[in-house]
Image (cartoon, helix red, strand yellow):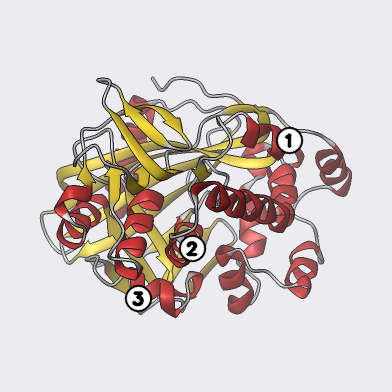
Amino acid sequence: MSRRVIDLAIVGGGLAGGLAALAVHRAQPQLRLGLFEAGESFGGNHRWSWFTSDIGGAGSELLTPFRKTEWATGYEVFFPGHARTLGSTYCSLASRDFDAALRRELPQEAIRTRSRVAELAPDGITLDHGERIPARAVVDCRDFEPSPHLNGGWQVFMGRHLRTGSPHGQKRPIVMDARVDQHDAYRFVYTLPLGAEELFVEDTYYADAPVLDRSALSGRIDRYCDAMGWHGDILGGETGVLPVITGGDFSAYRRGLGEPGVVRIGARGGFAHPLTSYTLPFSVANALQLAREATLPGEQLAALFEKRAHDHWRAMRFYRQLGRMLFDGARPEQRYRIFQRFYRLNEPLIERFYAGRPTRLDRLRVLTGKPPIPIPAAVRALLGKGSPLVHEKAR
């Protein structure tokens, strides 16, 4: 890539950045792009999953180039007092397939892996070895940064990719299996049958602290797989710690991200589902919006997405309230009861809930009926502020 000004410098080659680059290139192929990723591949080591109802037709079309696994037969949930099969089509995308599609679809000059960005400014970026790249607009798509300006809890997880020695017999995803010891958190195991003899098994915790104990989680996955009769070779895995945002000063958080004039989208920009930590529906929507407006001057793009971020924050208020009740109103070992009750509701409501598009009636329905936690505890949680989202290191 030459030193002349490029149109868009997209920093961060994860889900938000990769989809943004793809959408802009497809809609505005005349624009010069750079997709800058610190690692050796786009998407890192990760797996993203979603329901088809989470995105519209344009979003589905954007995802067409990616090799995905889809389950049209629905998915299952299991709780100590409730089990259910739901009919929504579920999809999953692995980072290796994400990387392969981007390398195939994007111009070669746009692909900048092993390019760690040290500084971002509205008119360009500086790589850690000193190279300065001028740009008409800079788009920050990096991962979420913990911040004392935001409050909440954490979603901690470890996933394992397993090849079984014989057919495992699991026909559809298990999105939540909470029939497991809770270990001072809302714990569930998530399973994707990727093939007749291939599984992805993830142990997940809604925990008060961002502590990822690899040894403990690995042992618990071992025991779960033993109980399910799944044995075989480990092909790989992933770990993660994601924020579950329940409140805070969003304006202060956005100001703390850096110099004004940079376009900020993705998880760092605040575009995530506060309760589930899902980012894919919002990454798709932001990528399509960026593609429509990509020819605007950088400062106008930044202002557009600044407003979009605050609109998203206001729209997600209901989920942050639920998150406060989850973390501050329910005892950790009883948190599963909230989800157990939720999965008794009608399926269209559940679909809208995950997509971040609940109706007023949906909100009312979620909150009415026999409460899964004591009402005084729920009131105290709603009136409280919660704990700052400050990170700790994994063990």
Q: Judge by depth and name the residue closer to the eye, 245 or 166.
A: 245
Q: Is residue 43 visible?
A: no
Q: CA distance from mark 2 to mark 1?
A: 28 Å
Q: The residue tagged with tag 2: helix, strand or loop?
A: helix
Tag 1: Cα neighbours inside 10 Å, few (<14), some, or many (≥20)?
Answer: few
Q: CA distance from mark 2 to mark 3?
A: 19 Å
Q: The residue tagged with tag 1: helix, strand or loop?
A: loop
Q: Judge by depth and name the residue closer to the eye, 350 or 289.
A: 289
Q: Where is mark 3, residue-wise?
A: 61
Q: CA distance from mark 3 to mark 1?
A: 36 Å
Which residue sits furthest left? 165
Q: Is residue 378 left or right of residue 58?
A: right
Q: The N terminus lies in which quarter of the figure?
A: top left
Q: Amino acid at mark 1?
A: Asp
Where's residue 20, x and y in %? 38, 56
Q: Where is mark 2, residue-wise?
A: 293
Q: Judge by depth and name the residue closer to the eye, 23 or 240.
A: 23
First in residue order: circle 3 vs circle 1:
3
Up the image or down, 377 lies above or below 64; here it is above
Q: Judge by depth and name the residue closer to the eye, 45 or 301.
A: 301
Residue 222's quadrant in the figure? Answer: top left
Q: Is residue 395 visible?
A: yes
For the point 39% across and 70% down, the residue is: 90
For the point 58% across and 45% down, the residue is: 270
First in residue order: circle 2 vs circle 1:
1
Q: Are marks 2 and 1 in contact (CB under 8 Å)?
A: no
Which disc number belongs to residue 108? none
Q: Is residue 379 left or right of residue 282?
A: right
Q: Are marks 3 and 1 in contact (CB under 8 Å)?
A: no
Which disc number belongs to residue 249? 1
